[in-house]
Image: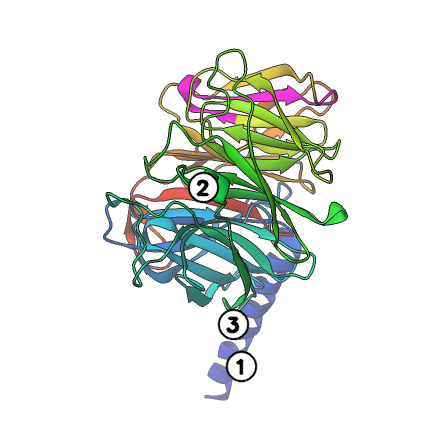
Amino acid sequence: MLRLFFVILAAMVAFVITGQSYAQGQAEKHLFVWVGDRAGEGNDFILVIDADPASANYGRVVASEASDQRSVNAHHTEYEMPASGMLFANDHDANRTIILDLTNPLQPRQAAAFTSLDGYSMPHSFARLPNGNVLATFQHVEQHGEHHAGTTRPVMSGGIVEIDNSGAMVRSVSNADPAFVDEGLLPYGLAVLPEIDRVLVTNSPMSNDWLMTSNTYQVFRLSDLELLGTYRLDPGPRLNGHISPEEPRVGPDGAVYVHTLSCGVQRVTGLDTPTPHAQLVHQYPGNWCGVPTIMGRYMVQAVPDIHAFIVLDISDGANPVEVSRLNMGEDFDPHWTAWDPDIRRLVVTPGKSGQRMYLLKLDEATGALTIDSTFRGQDGEVGFSFGSQTWPHGWTGEGAPHGAVFSR
């Protein structure tokens, strides 16, 4: 009996040591992917993958954990892992955001959740503030307790809301502008510029309302969230480079670069002046461009119409130069991108269920992108498959990945 006790004790010690070794030794970097079930049968879940190129398990699943949200449209997470380890992840069409505690990558858990806040609904994007809270764009104002996304008369504006890590509202402000009462001012993305006390917010609908006429951005003062002005973007020579502005990113020159759904790149300057200025500096082929990322002097853009990622050198921000393209094949629908400065990898997720996710390498001398062939999932193939399988938390089905961020 005593011998059995020591055998069990030894096994338990070995398990603990192995777990600590994995967490502290083999996996210095993890990748967190927010995944849904487009069939609507499973729940949104967080997937944890070993993203340490030096690990023997590089590309393999470490853990997964389901949220309590039945999948409708698992959508945006934050773009970078916050210092707190509390990641905001949204199911947009369900009007619900999950706050995930990822401080222990081997044991991810849902810590909190929220829906509408202070009369605003349908949050889309999240950005961290210097105080550690989140500033989020909410597309709609509620009326009689119901959001109006997808109805015959959607609300014409929304708001931005500051939220703490428990999901509680700290402060909020409407983005309604009396000078634009006949247009849809539906907040989509945001860039926070604390050095100049500004927030830039883009207006673009998640539904089809005003899709072809949305062409504005707004500037708020960060300290008190006062709306300083609503401004139009530059249509450019093709007269459509300003349609549906989505993701803003702060460039190395301090300007904000905004990608549009019509695949334009707008460079916004003078945000600390009464007259900011937007200029269309580039336009990619096609439409429906996805999430961009800026890495030093390079800006990478998902361009689904050509199934590729395009890299611009924005050293001269007013005159960016295309330096490379990475074609992913006709079956791949590129959408999300996120960069990790530690392992120098870019994660790219597809816009369709069941496809593969990849990590890309960037040649920082030339701007060329290549697929990291050593990042391989459980099937041993390059990339990670979201095809139908049984996930660690017990659900079986085809995954629909969207937001993905690296651990700090």
Could you tell me how far apart the alpha carbons at marks 2 and 1 are, in whole angstroms? 67 Å
Amino acid at the residue labelled 1: Phe
- In the rendered image, residue 306 lying in the magenta stretch gets the answer yes
Q: Quadrant of the N terminus?
A: bottom left
Could you tell me how far apart the alpha carbons at marks 1 and 3 are, in whole angstroms? 8 Å
Residue 205 vertical placement versus 325 (above, below): below
Residue 296 vertical placement versus 69 (above, below): above
Q: Nearer the viewer, mark 1 or mark 3?
A: 3
Is the residue marked by circle 2 packed among few (<14), some (14-19), or many (20+) residues within 10 Å?
many
Question: Which is more N-terminal, label 3 or label 1?
Answer: 1
Amino acid at the residue labelled 2: Leu
SS at circle 3: helix
Where is residue 62? Give x, y as percent: 49, 54
Q: Is residue 192 left or right of residue 102?
A: right
Label 2 sits on residue: 185
Label 1 sits on residue: 6
Residue extending farthest top: 237
Quarter of the figure with residue 228: top right
Q: Which mark is residue 11?
A: 3
Residue 317 vs residue 220, the one in the foreground: 220
SS at circle 1: helix
Where is residue 71? Give x, y as percent: 30, 52
- In the rendered image, residue 186 lying in the magenta stretch gets the answer no
Q: Nearer the viewer, mark 2 or mark 1?
A: 2
Question: Which is more N-terminal, label 3 or label 2?
Answer: 3
Residue extending farthest bottom: 1
Which segment is the magenta one? 302-317
Residue 80 vs residue 133, the one in the foreground: 133
